[in-house]
Image (cartoon, helix red, strand yellow):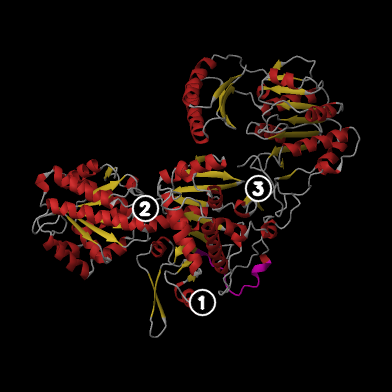
Amino acid sequence: MVSRSCKSLLDLATGDMFNSAQSPRRIPRVMTVPGTVSEIGGGKINDGDFDALSFECREKKIIVANFLPLQAQKDMRSGRWSFSFDEDSLLLQMKDGFLSDTDVVYVGSLKVDVDSSEQDEVSGRLLEEFNCVPTFLPPDLQKKFYHGFCKHYLWSLFHYMLPMCPDYGNRFDRLLWQAYLSANKIFVQKIMEVINPEVDYVWVHDYHLMVLPTFLRKRLPRVKLGFFLHSPFPSSEIYQSLPVRDEILKALLNADLIGFQTFDYARHFLSCCCRLLGLDYESKRGHIGLEYFGRTVYIKILPVGIHMGQLQSALNHPSSSTRVKEIFQQFEGKKLIVGVDDMDIFKGINLKVLAMEQLLQQHTGLRGKVVLVQILNPARSTGKDVQEAKREIYKSTQRTNDAFGFPGYEPVVLIDRHVPFYEKTAYYAFAECCIVNAVRDGMNLVPYKYIVCRQGTSIMDAALQIATGSPRMSTLVVSEFIGCSPSLSGAIRVNPWDIDAVADALNMAITMPDVEKQQRHEKHYRYVSSHDVAYWARSFMQDLEGACREHYSKNCWGIGFGLSFRILSLSPSFRQLSIEHIVSAHGRTCRRAIFLDYDGTVVPHSSITKTPSPEVILVLNNLCCDPKNTVFIVSGRGQNSLSDWFAQCENIGMAAEHGYFIRWSRTSEWETIPVAVDFGWKRIAEPVMKSYTEATDGSYIESKESALVWHHQDADPDFGSCQAKELLDHLESVLANEPVAVKRGRQIVEVKPQGVTKGFVTEKILSTMTSNGKPPDFILCIGDDRSDEDMFESISISSLPVPTEIFACTVGQKPSKASYYLDDTIDVLRLLKSLAAASSSTTPTNDTVISSQPVPPEIEVSFESFA
């Protein structure tokens, strides 16, 4: 374990992986706030740093992606570079979602190599003319980063293909992982050259930069940072096979907002966080949030849209009209099915051809009348798997055409060349059906483009000889496994592996009545036109702004080494409990009340043996020997367990079952608090709990005299949490008219009588002390669970007749109603030893001293309450 005296945490590296070649800083920096946590960790920014600025600070949107939205070409004769914006780039199109005067800066790589001698000049041009900051990864690093780790591992894994197999190498290559880290770090260096962390927002895109949030958050703890994953996120069973799974998850959690295309992808991510990191999530007012070290990391589900203006311009282009007339003549009298896919192994192109073959085999009347035109976009990756897939497509196409074709008719037409955008729009506009048959894909925008093109324009209508104002029709066959499938409710969804089902879907699509085609088309067009790329960008940025609103209302500390770095964000009033301070207050007071939770406070949750150690018994006895001290164990445990465990403590008080039973000392009798004693509700609750126990392996029921508790700590983390939420709702419904409270705790669901809380029992004890003429002038309350928050709240609002020193302390640094914290049960025991020593008028030894200051940013701290 790392020593807490270790300094300069942020300057430490985990190894050579972070010592990549540093690209020289070529662009003047506009960041004026030092990026170290220690300088801004106290929640205050030195505004004097901005006095030196000679310009007005203006908010920027910094868009970070693997590639810049640029096209680059070098004239080999003159040696000059020419650059232009790539109008097809999503990064460029998303600007429509921002205000017109928004300053947008792009950070990413060019798709061409630029010699190191030219990089300074190119950087200056791109920043000045295009607001683009190129990263210029060295060729060897680029190869290992992009073609190595990104394509070989992440892209394959995220599309449900395990890369650790004989064809792809049996062993995880750490050199590729180090290249991925080095590349991400270079991207961060470029962001640092242009960012003003006070006002700018950073939006990072896709799986190429998944660890970037950690490197950037390390330098700028309060950076406003969003991340959007354009690819699928696999199920936890697949993702868990990645050797660096925890590092990537923790890096993503350093973002403020994480976006996914579909709920399935978000659900898989949340499941991984639950299973691997022990984190739970909840939805509040429609927003999903993960609590992570005092920060709320928000999850957004929003499919990407298309650029309506670009499509409509393409439809009105003269080349489109010319091409659609040629297509009209070529396929006159035939029903055209169109497919447009990248040439890769996940698009299901061969399955599509096989379905077409099956369609013609089963429906002889369609022969000569139906044509599948499949456009093959160039492959984005290389390898024998792509070449093998291409050979299979050509083989299936040839077999289908030989079997069902005849002079003047080819059932399957492959277009394996670069197809201009205007030509694709022409095919979309003419085709009666579009099929996207990918076996796994992110946000495939082909169906959206097809729908808009089928809506047409007046120019395209004239080329197709369609009367103005005539009904628009379209049909879609889409795979269940693509990102846009959930948003296209009128599409015919298919399992691409079920060739018979795909063939039936194609038959249904082309023989569907025109009225139904029209209704489906209208439904789709309403959605696509209102959820375009501008809507997507605007909605994401609005949520990112909302997620960052509390950045400057809390104190921040950086903790953790390397990729385990994270930000601890806490209220300014929340601080570490100082032994010196509390011992001093202890010495000034005469009547002291000390309330201690049991599990997780004096005994660790991880302890197999739940009985208190001899050391704990000794410390508690020493505290109880002081007549000025009233010490209570306030626990959810039953009275029998507490009686047995603390049989050697004569003067200790105990509150069992959250205070339903109270005993002031070992010799006194157990009392029950004055609440309704009708336990008829148990006959209702217990069968419900039993049904969930039978359905949830690893769960069990604990029956107390006053309560029933359903435990799921030994169940599957994801399933157990899901079942607990469902059980909570179920019990609240069936017990709505009963005098009980249903609560969730740490891996439990508990039903107990209303009014039975730790807060109520502390009020009762304090009231009794006051009525006996001994109102306490010192209160210490320590606990770690949700149930202990009632105690913290109770003592903070208690009205006592004398001035009182109050110390509400939670175990573990986390959001709490307590004003103080201790890190773990070890620190709790140290504190109790110091108080016992003070009660005995002895001086605490040096090893019992805990820092009296808030957590310094450079100190590594361990938190058992978080994964």
Q: Would you say the magenta stretch is mainly helix, strand or loop?
A: loop
Inspect the image, locate mark 2, and give the three-letter code of the amino acid beneath it.
Answer: Met
Q: Residue 498: which numbered mark, if any? A: none
Magenta part of the chain: 48-61
Judging by the rendered image, the residue that carries numbered circle 2 is 443
Judging by the rendered image, the residue that carries numbered circle 1 is 116
Q: Nearer the viewer, residue 457 or 856?
A: 856
**Quarter where residue 382 is shown:** bottom left
Which is closer to the viewer, label 1 or label 3? 1
Could you tell which of marks 1 and 3 lies nearer the N-terminus? 1
Q: Give yes or no for residue 59 being in the magenta stretch.
A: yes
Could you tell which of marks 1 and 2 lies nearer the N-terminus? 1
- For this view, does 266 lie left or right of residue 674? left
Q: Residue furthest front?
A: 166
Judging by the rendered image, the residue that carries numbered circle 3 is 570
Which is closer to the viewer, label 3 or label 2? 2
Inspect the image, locate mark 3, and give the three-letter code of the amino acid beneath it.
Answer: Leu
